[in-house]
Amino acid sequence: MNHSVLSKFLLHIGDSQLVLSQRLAEWCGHAPELEIDIALANIGLDLLGQARNFLTLAGQYDEAQRDEDQLAYFRTEREFLNLLLCEQPNGDFAQTIVRQWLMDHYHLHLFTALAQSSLPELSALAVKSLKEVKYHIRFSTSWMERLSLSTDEAHQRVQGGLNNLWRFTAELFELNADEKALVAQGVIPDFSNEKEQWNQTIADELKRFELNVAVNGAYRRGAKQGLHTEHLGYLLAEMQCIQRTYPGMTW
């Protein structure tokens, strides 16, 4: 088993959870209602916990043996491997819900598949994460339904968020050439079934919500090459500023 390839695969998951958690944290104190504010904060904390677990495991297979803090705070934008979808700005509440809903369904299929991994530590993390994802998906789906099937303005905002974000979904479940060796070893699945199931679930739900897929521009990829949108650099600058200013500082 190639430890470097496995480490990068784990970083891809950990980075995605970390960046999405940071985005949800931006809603703290600004959500439409107190209940929503608390819910988004709790989901963000769940994602942060998942990020810590995956970054810690990635560090164990990392050539430099970096820990979770070193991986989170001392890598550059080009070294982050998170999904482009996660780094997109919150926009309004509707767009945040659309992004979370797309990611929640992705997480459901991702962790269900990884629970069957031949690597015990990875399987255990996936099983643990699934318990949280099931709550997340109930929250985001309930708000997708409420917003899309209520007023014209709410429906238009959800549709607008979907239009903005859909082009970043193409790289979900994609594996690069190096990762396919891990498939042969049973460490990870090839995700072809998961991608198909995700597409079908999303299509069925969008029909129920009376929403349509529309791509504004070409599909975007680049996560695993460290090729990101302009938004990630600003997010990392804020997230990393304390450790960059005072390296090694602890509470």
Image (tube, rainbow, N blue to C red):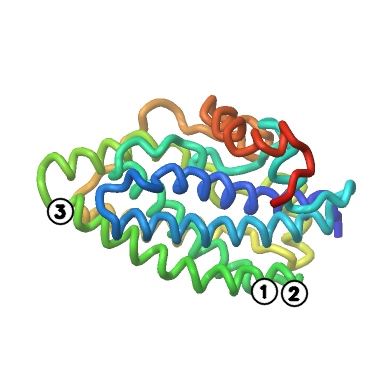
Q: Residue at x 26, y 48 (%)?
A: 32
Q: Is residue 163 above or below residue 249?
A: above
Residue 190 in the image: x percent, y percent? 64, 59
What amino acid is labelled 2 in the image? Pro
**Residue on which disc 3 sits:** 149
Quote the CA–CA distance across marks 2 and 1.
6 Å
Label 2 close to label 1 by CB (< 8 Å): yes
Which numbered circle lies on residue 120?
A: 2
Viewer-closest of 1 and 251? 251
Label 2 close to label 3 by CB (< 8 Å): no
Viewer-closest of 7 and 246? 246
Residue 30 in the image: x percent, y percent? 33, 44
Q: Residue at x 70, y 67 (%)?
A: 122
* Residue 194 visible in the snapshot: no
Density class for disc 3 (Cα within 10 Å; few <14, some 14-19, many ≥20) is some
Image quadrant where residue 213 sits: top left
Which numbered circle lies on residue 124?
A: 1
What amino acid is labelled 3 in the image? Leu
Residue 44 in the image: x percent, y percent? 48, 55
Point out the image quarter for the N terminus: bottom right
Viewer-closest of 103 and 219? 103
Q: Residue at x 87, y 52 (%)?
A: 65
Question: Is 178 left, or right, of 202 in this rendering?
Answer: right
Quote the CA–CA distance across marks 1 and 3.
38 Å
* Circle 1 SS class: helix
Density class for disc 2 (Cα within 10 Å; few <14, some 14-19, many ≥20) is few
Task: Choose the circle earlier in sequence order: 1 or 3.
Answer: 1
Residue 188 in the image: x percent, y percent? 69, 63
